[in-house]
Amino acid sequence: MAIATINPATGETLKTFEPLSEHEVDERLALAAAEFEIYRATDFKQRAAWMQSAAGLLESEQEQVARLMTTEMGKTLVSARAEVAKCVKGMRYYAEHAEEFLADEPADAPAVGARKAYARYQPLGPVLAVMPWNFPLWQAVRFAAPALMAGNVGLLKHASNVPQTALYLGELFARAGFPRGCFQTLLIGSGQVEAVLRDRRVVAATLTGSEPAGRSVAAIAGSEVKKTVLELGGSDPYIVMPSADLDGAVATAVTARVQNNGQSCIAAKRFIVHAEVYDDFADRFVARMEALRVGDPEDESTDVGPLATRQGRDDVEKIVADAAGRGARVLCGGWSPDRPGWFYQPTVVAGVTPEMRLFGEEVFGPVASLYRVGDIDEALALANITSFGLGSNAWTADVVEQERFITDLEAGIVCINGMVVSYPELPFGGVKNSGYGRELSAHGIREFCNIKAVWIG
């Protein structure tokens, strides 16, 4: 993929960029390594002041940045503004809590024959962040804010279709007062990532993206014995039981499926509904999906904008066509509007069976699959059959059922009577092929720290 801004609402190429040369990459790695030796000695008060300054700048530039994201990857302007606000909140959260999260942890000194014993968190060094296009600001900030507050320095390899958002981030932290080598954007293609990851000056990596990309980065980092955190795909279940608030379950289901134009790892994708309420849920859900307005993402009345890339739209078309060709029933949608840009109509598919791609693959677009089940055991079995394990949703007023879902759903996140959302206050990540490690909360800031045991006799 060329490094370029291509408006997905029109297909028009607006701006292209040349990737950094090998020499330019080396200069940036050298700067990161040199800056780390200085920056690691700064105190939390100074880092927090810079981070608060960055949050203030971003907040004041919300409209400009929101429109940039809408232009580059097609998210609605309303959701883009919300993403900026979420980033501001996340930056302030770590500015306020990093010192507490990374304070020395006392241990039982007498038990180990010491006068004093504790664990100390110390930064590792330059960390490479390979980030996706779907939340071009939030994905990068949720790495950058804790990494910088911990004393690490960041190197951002962003997706090639959001270069201007990536460059904005690289300058934001410098404008806020952080030394220039603390956070740098590397405009490089995917073929240049391996060399950067293998460079001795890069000590760790984090990736949010596809399963194949995660496997590649993990394999390279493993051969170099470097720490990684991976947040990969998801095929999140959304379970509705007879005791559920059906009005709330239906309304939230639509939002959970089409958030970010359906392009979210934690979007609900498989709707698993108890037979007692299946018909009622299906009728209401389909009606609401059909009523969504697809159109210009800059129009504030638009519910669903275009998919970010032509390839992404084509992939969604093929997955739905495969299901329909094998006997699934398309209850609404299932087609691309005849207009410029990479739009796809919100779609609901029923009768999905294991031989269909839609059963086992993550579909990255506004497509929901509906399943009917007879009891909680069948619901859990179907929810857990996938190779993914990122988020999960369950709607029930029965506290016994709630506990079953919390305990037995194979996922990094379980949301009861709501939809999965990432919060700075809660750990975020998955199990199985959805990756490993955690972002956000205290757990996230500690991922790229040396947890040093200290014993004083």
Image: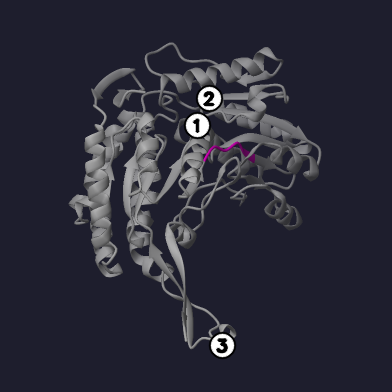
> Left or right: where does residue 33 sit relative to residue 413?
left
Instruction: Specify the amino acid type for callout 3.
Output: Pro
Instruction: Specify the amino acid type for callout 1.
Output: Gly
User: How many residues crowd mark 3 within 10 Å: few (<14), some (14–19), many (20+)?
Assistant: few
Q: Position of residue 13 (x, y in %)?
A: 28, 19
Do tag 1 and tag 2 residues touch (Cβ < 8 Å)? yes
Per the model, the C-alpha gap separating discs 1 and 2 is 9 Å
What SS does tag 1 mark?
helix
User: How many residues crowd mark 1 within 10 Å: few (<14), some (14–19), many (20+)?
Assistant: many
Residue 275 visible in the shown view: yes
Q: Position of residue 193 (x, y in %)?
A: 38, 36
- Which residue is labeled 2 in the image? 346
- Which residue is labeled 3 in the image? 110
Task: Please identify, in this view, whether the residue under mark 3 or under mark 2 is nearer the observer.
Answer: 3
Q: Bounds of the magenta span? A: 232-237
Do tag 3 and tag 1 residues touch (Cβ < 8 Å)? no
Residue 262 image label: 1
Whichever of labels 3 and 2 marks the residue nearer the N terminus, that label is 3
What SS does tag 3 mark?
helix
382 is higher (above) or lower (below) than 144: above
Compare residues 96 and 64 and report the one nearer the observer.
96
Instruction: Specify the amino acid type for callout 2.
Output: Pro
**Residue 44 belongs to magenta span:** no
User: How many residues crowd mark 2 within 10 Å: few (<14), some (14–19), many (20+)?
Assistant: many
Task: Please identify, in this view, whether the residue under mark 3 or under mark 1 is nearer the observer.
Answer: 3
